[in-house]
Image (cartoon, helix red, strand yellow):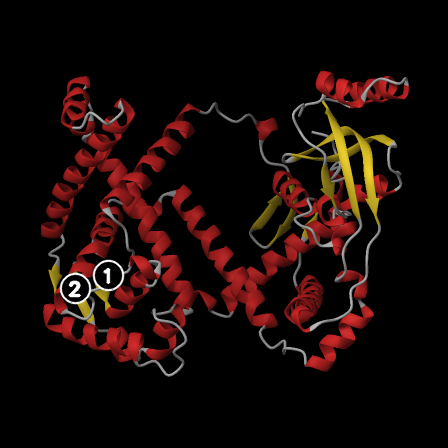
Amino acid sequence: MLAISFFGLWVVSYNCYSAEQQKQEQPVVKEAEQPIVVAKISDYIINKKELEQRVKNEIFPYGYDQSNEQAGIIDVSETLLEMIAEKAMIMEGRKLGYLQDEEISASIDRFKNGRLAGMVWMQYAKSREDELNITQEEIDNQIKANPKLKPTQANKLLQNQKANKLIEKYYGQLCEKFHWKKQSENFSKVVQVHDRLLNQSKNRKQWWILNDQVKDEVTPEEKDIVLATYDGGKITLKDWLYALVQFSPPNRPKDLNTEKGVEAFLDRISKAPVLVAEAKSLGLDKDKDYLKQLRDREDMNLLGKVMTEKVKDVNEPTEEQIVQYFEKNEEKFGTPKTLKIDQIWCENLEIANKVKSELDGGKDFDAVKSEYSLQKQSKPFNCYPGSEGIFFADLWKGEPNQIVGPTKGFYGEGIKWRIVKILEKKPAEIKEYSANMKDGVKGKMMSEQKEAILADYRKELLKNYSYEVYADKIRDIDPLKVQ
């Protein structure tokens, strides 16, 4: 079951309502605007926009690590094959029954309940709009009661108050309709299990309860202890515990060593299940958009589970292996090549050429920057292979006080033309191995081992599954297209 507050439901429903409004306001999509399919495997399709977004994500560098100097060299067809293989992994996960994995099923249930509870509340709230409307008089009175409030704050406060009042009323009606009943005789058992997990765990390393403890240290009989029932469903100790671990430790109730505390937390998490029962009675669980979102969430969980299972047996390297790996890959762990640069971001190539021409003609760099740059206030900064990716090689060819360009670079979430002035240039430096480098070297080593295993697995799946690739649909995808 789902831990969700009245305010949380209001937020969910408001977001749902906004999405519904946007959907209704959108024009009908013309035939020519339909997604362009670039690959199929079973009933999964991959469209061109998805592939372009994936390529975009892969081409962007994400850090300081100099080993990323080649980041951005993307083969679009290889990226597409990787996406197809991931769909095959998801299909494998379904075959292996991973949706029944306790943690995955709990995660999926939380998603289902959150979406359905939000949908049914949104539907109910829309039918009671008159009870949720805020008048100017109400806002004025709220500000009179608390002069520190701004009108927007007063409006938000009134919205929350009215929403909570309405959902309390609605929840009460649904509890009667679905014959909600607590099993208070079992609350003492919850206290005992909670105390054991919190204070008597054999592998105790922290002062809070973890997901793995719920999965591994609570018996099946204990997990099935019923705390509340309603027509068509129940809340068990397993639901209660998984709801608890969703809260950050500082925000968990401090009185769960008492039956009163157990009941209070049960009340806190029990609103969504009753709302979900109503949603199902209204057929909202058959909504096409909801079912697509549900499948997408299942797929995300399945992909993660399959990949985790595939690499779980990778052993930690020995000290000797770590040192040997470092000695063979010293360049990955030293100080990277560094350039200090200033740059002029240009709207297009035509302007970039004009900027370069004016600079070649002797104009002052700062003056030209203030006239043409998209970021006139930017300051000189250090850049590295890991921050510039594929574009670093062109910059590195320059020398101090030299103007480079027009050259491309990562601008926001896209790519634009720029003119770059090289201010300083420092070559990479090799470091000697030391004990404080151990974890970093080990992490890099194990990461490469896991990626090699997954790469082989992807190749294996592509041999075992039938799929179609529409090569003519991806020929015009340019990873380095200026946007």
Q: Which residue is at the front of the view, 215 or 383?
A: 383
Position of 152 relative to 118 (above/below):
above
Amino acid tagged 1:
Pro
- Residue 239 located left or right of residue 166: right
In the picture, the disc for residue 261 is 2
Q: Residue at x 85, y 43 (%)?
A: 396
Q: Which residue position holds label 1?
A: 253
Q: Determine which quarter of the picture holds residue 412.
A: top right
Q: Residue at x 67, y 73 (%)?
A: 435
Q: Determine which quarter of the picture holds residue 134.
A: top left
Amino acid tagged 2:
Gly
Numbered disc 1: secondary structure: loop
Q: Residue at x 35, y 37 (%)?
A: 16
Q: Which residue is at the front of the view, 315 or 40?
A: 315
**How would you rate the neighbour count of disc 2 (Cα within 10 Å): few for under 14, some for 14-19, many for 20 or more?**
some
- Residue 258 located left or right of residue 27: left
- Say whether marks 2 and 1 touch (CB < 8 Å): yes
